Image (cartoon, rainbow, N blue to C red):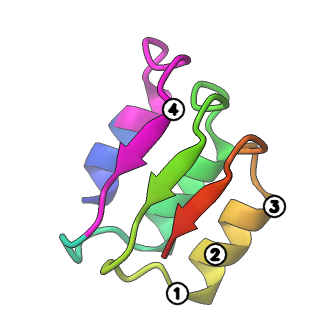
Amino acid sequence: CDAGVGCLADSRSLPNLTALHLNDNGLISAGGVKRLAESPHLGGLRVLDVSANDVGDAGVSALVNGRLHRLHTLRV
């Protein structure tokens, strides 16, 4: 859910995380994805899967304009 995603985004122990699969739960919204995209602690992410969630256009926009500059695989 968005609260869990917020905890991940705020965690300082994940700078080396390279893949995050949060697909198929339907509980993550654009707000949760925005928290991930703006996190200063997830800059190492290369793969992110948030498919089958309610991300919408706002979530995709947040990911494109966020801090996850190393992403090479994104599933929405």
Q: Where is residue 5 in the image (x, y as percent from the top left)?
A: 36, 47
Quarter of the picture containing the N terminus is bottom left
Query: Mark 3 or 2 closer to N-term?
Result: 2
- Is 66 positioned to the left or the right of 31 in the image? right
- Mark pair 2, 1: CA separation: 7 Å
- Label 4 element class: loop
- Mark pair 2, 4: CA separation: 19 Å
Q: Is residue 48 magenta?
A: no
- Disc 4 designates what residue? 18
- Label 3 element class: helix
Q: What amino acid type should be assigned to the residue bearing mark 2?
A: Val
- Mark pair 4, 3: CA separation: 19 Å
Q: Residue 65 — which label? A: 3
Q: What amino acid type should be assigned to the residue bearing mark 4?
A: Thr
- Is 27 positioned to the left or the right of 50 in the image? left
- Please provide the residue range marked out in magenta: 8-23
- Mark pair 1, 3: CA separation: 15 Å
- Disc 1 designates what residue? 56
- Mark pair 1, 4: CA separation: 23 Å
Q: What amino acid type should be assigned to the residue bearing mark 1?
A: Gly
Q: What amino acid type should be assigned to the residue bearing mark 3?
A: Asn
Q: How crowded is mark 1: few (under 14 residues within 10 Å), some or many (20 or more)?
A: few
- Mark pair 3, 2: CA separation: 9 Å
The residue positioned farthest toward the left in the image shown: 25
